[in-house]
Image (spheres, rainbow, N blue to C red):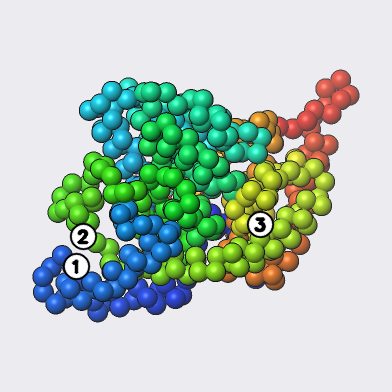
Amino acid sequence: MQVYLDNNATTMCDPQVVEAMQPFFSEMYGNPNSLHKFGTAPHPALSHAIDQVYKGLNASDNDDIVFTSCATESNNWVLQSVFNDNIVNGDKNHIVTTEVEHPSVLSTCKWLEEQGVKVTYLPVNDQGVVEAHTVKSFITEKTALVSIMWASNETGMINPIKEIGEICKEKGVRFHSDAVQAVGKIPVDLQDVHVDFISFSAHKFHGPKGIGALYIKDSQDLTPLLHGGEQMGGRRSGTLNVPYIVGMGKAIELATTNIEEKMASIRAKRDHLEDEIVKLSDTFVVGNRENRTPNTILISIKGVEGEGMLWDLNNGQIGASTGSACASADLEANTVMLAIGADNELAHTGIRLSLSRFTTDEEVEYTIQHFKDAVFRLRNISSSFAKQAPTKGGEVQECELH
Ligand code: C6P
């Protein structure tokens, strides 16, 4: 058996999505900006896909949803354009974000700091959540943008987006949320929350890789990042990626239809997996699971280094991660665990397990068994290392395993 439990990194493309995309590669391949019949052939499918995305988010007709290449582009677009619109051409020079954003936000903020922007990186509480009153206390008359992720890719913890949105509205500050780990996993109702921009990405909800989007409330102005042929009403130039837009539409429709039922089914499997794993001694799960996306567990197992665990799980045909896929090669401590106050040693033991609607009960049972065996094996290895360590004055010296 092989088990994929890295769905926060990316998901399998749903076969129904692949089927919906297929005709637009080799039959209806015209450029939708061309005036001939090849160009107009994909128009009905494009309109349908756009409707599916609006419906999936309960966006209003006054809002704009612009397709991008990925959420990284959407995040860069908002941050860089707010910098251009408010900071270069205006008198606001401050952005509020958090310490635990995805690198596509954090690295852009670091770059903006080099351009002279002041950035406040808010701390999170011991649950990994940013508190609304903290956001409020750091907004000043110089603040041009608040950018706070909807749900964490590492812990699954959900931020109080509705409350933060109300604060931003009251203060007259634009509010962006990186909703990559929320869309398709939990209800995202844009009539219920006040948010100016959200970024999201199809490959996180069983759509294709290489397509994301930016939601823009009330179609407000935002300087384009890509200038060129004026596609998407001049918002984002470049030939429309018809198959992927069709795929994103189908994927969001499949993910958001009866979402509560899908969440309940994933949550039941996740909770069972978590309940069994925490029976092991000295385990620690980050964040209260009632306030987590239903598919995610970030667990640390004292004395078991994350990379060793990944290697053992991989030998058992189980794909997991130690945190963000883009940070997985650096062997550093998990930054979110450090942010919630874990010490360096504990922050090296994080393992992220992320399920999807395709995860089966059999896969969960197999993972529980293999996980328990792996912890037993790795703890034995580390205790025999400690026993073999050279002694000084008759005392055992602990080996440094990191
Ligand atoms: N997180 C993870 O393993 P792209 O790939 O550009 O569409 O999405 C980037 C991105 C932005 N924001 C959040 C919250 C994300 O989780 C991701 C992707 C993956 O956690 C890969 S690093």
Whole-angstrom CA distance, mark 2 to mark 3, is: 42 Å
For image coordinates 75% across by 40% down, the residue present is 303
Residue at mark 1: 32
Disc 3 secondary structure class? helix
Q: Earlier in the sequence, mark 2 or mark 1?
A: 1
Q: Earlier in the sequence, mark 2 or mark 3?
A: 2
Residue 369 appears left or right of 61: right
Quarter holding residue 57: bottom left
Whole-angstrom CA distance, mark 2 to mark 1, is: 8 Å
Q: Nearer the viewer, residue 333 or 222?
A: 222
For image coordinates 33% across by 41% down, the residue present is 78
The numbered dot on residue 239 is 2
For image coordinates 55% across by 42% down, the residue present is 160
How dense is the environment of label 2, judged by Cα within 10 Å: few (below 14), some, or many (20 and up)? some
How dense is the environment of label 3, judged by Cα within 10 Å: few (below 14), some, or many (20 and up)? many
For image coordinates 74% across by 60% down, the residue present is 272
Disc 2 secondary structure class? loop
Quarter holding residue 91: top left
Which amino acid type corresponds to the residue marked 1 in the rendered image? Answer: Pro
- Contact, mark 2 vs mark 1 (Cβ under 8 Å): yes
Disc 1 secondary structure class? loop
Indicate the quadrant containing the C terminus: top left, top right, bottom left or bottom right. Answer: top right
Indicate the quadrant containing the N terminus: top left, top right, bottom left or bottom right. Answer: bottom right
Q: Nearer the viewer, residue 228 or 371?
A: 228
| x then y, percent, for residue 236 | 23, 51
| x then y, percent, for residue 372 | 77, 56
Quarter holding residue 110: top left
For this orientation, the residue located farthest to the right is 394
Residue at mark 3: 313
